[in-house]
Image (cartoon, rainbow, N blue to C red):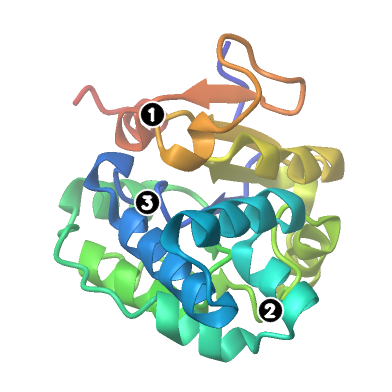
């Protein structure tokens, strides 16, 4: 059942694999650069470096946080390196631009990436002027989603009342802290690599209010469109 959204005043979206289709596999380019970074840093062959990368992601929320905690890596250096990718896999999405514009209230991007990369992606999608702000990893004090402090910091910085906010993410685990604060949560179950790692396949945990498969199709139902 679709929850009542009349009370929503802040629409919060994850970036990667959420505001663009997971099938574009843009994140794969970042993922490959992270593996290469770990390989160079720790002098490991590719397969071992990838295993370390994925274990840090699972245990620390992001590969970067694991590298910071265990190897003293500088966040800015890491982010500049792994986000140095071409964006030609994604294109302007006028349908999504119109849908975001039609949402009542403020719109925010909440990403474990940095604002520079997020801005590049939003511009490529045609969404450069669509959002009121970007809450990035630096704004989180380098403590990423799903740490509770990241969500509290977003609400404090942007004056968001979580009880009138909705959060969309392709990673279900990132919705749990949002729900704990009182946000309405939407899991974009779009087959992304990150979402596929969730420990459930057929049912949603209690912290997911709505499970969708396509962002634009769902937004059409909110905006009252048939297409």
On the image, the x and y values in percent for residue 148 come to 84, 55
Q: How many residues crowd around disc 3 within 10 Å: few (fewer than 14), some, or many (20 or more)?
A: many
What residue sits right under mark 3 in the picture?
A: 19
**Quadrant (top left, top right, bottom left, bottom right) of the C terminus:** top left
Q: Report, in whole angstroms, how far the alpha carbon at label 3 lies from the one at label 1.
A: 13 Å
Q: How many residues crowd around disc 2 within 10 Å: few (fewer than 14), some, or many (20 or more)?
A: some
Please report contact status of discs 2 and 1: CB closer than 8 Å, yes or no: no
Q: Is residue 7 above or below residue 66?
A: above
SS class, disc 1: helix
- In which quadrant of the rendered view does residue 190 lie? top left
Is 128 placed left or right of 113 in the picture? Answer: left
Q: How many residues crowd around disc 1 within 10 Å: few (fewer than 14), some, or many (20 or more)?
A: some
Give the label, 3 or 1, closer to the camera: 3
Q: Is residue 215 above or below residue 81?
A: above
SS class, disc 2: loop
Q: Report, in whole angstroms, how far the alpha carbon at label 2 lies from the one at label 3.
A: 20 Å
On the image, the x and y values in percent for residue 43 come to 53, 77
Give the label, 2 or 1, closer to the camera: 2
Image disc number at residue 139: 2
On the image, the x and y values in percent for residue 102 come to 36, 48
SS class, disc 3: loop
Q: How many marks?
A: 3
**Quadrant (top left, top right, bottom left, bottom right) of the N terminus:** top right
What residue sits right under mark 1 in the picture?
A: 218
Q: Residue at x 39, y 76 (%)?
A: 83
Q: Residue at x 65, y 17 (%)?
A: 204
Q: Report, in whole angstroms, how far the alpha carbon at label 2 lies from the one at label 1.
A: 29 Å
**Residue sitting nearer the eye, 185 or 36:** 36
């Amino acid at each position: 059942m679709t929850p009542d959204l009349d009370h929503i005043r802040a629409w919060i979206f994850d970036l990667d694999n959420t505001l663009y289709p997971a099938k574009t596999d843009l994140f794969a380019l970042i993922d490959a650069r992270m593996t290469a970074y770990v390989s160079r840093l720790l002098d490991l062959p590719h397969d071992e470096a990838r295993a370390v990368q994925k274990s840090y992601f699972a245990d620390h929320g992001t590969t970067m946080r694991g590298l910071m905690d265990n190897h003293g890596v500088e966040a800015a250096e890491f982010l500049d390196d792994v986000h140095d990718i071409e964006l030609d896999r994604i294109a302007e999405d006028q349908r999504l631009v119109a849908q975001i514009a039609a949402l009542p209230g403020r719109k925010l991007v909440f990403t474990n990436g940095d604002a520079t990369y997020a801005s590049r992606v939003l511009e490529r999608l045609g969404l450069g002027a669509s959002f009121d702000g970007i809450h990035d990893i630096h704004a989180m004090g380098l403590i990423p989603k799903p740490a509770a402090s990241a969500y509290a910091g977003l609400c404090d910085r942007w004056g968001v009342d979580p009880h009138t906010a909705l959060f969309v993410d392709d990673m279900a685990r990132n919705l749990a802290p949002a729900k704990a604060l009182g946000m309405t949560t939407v899991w974009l179950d779009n087959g992304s690599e990150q979402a596929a790692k969730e420990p459930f396949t057929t049912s949603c945990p209690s912290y997911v209010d709505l499970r969708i498969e396509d962002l634009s199709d769902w937004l059409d139902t909110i905006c009252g469109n048939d297409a």
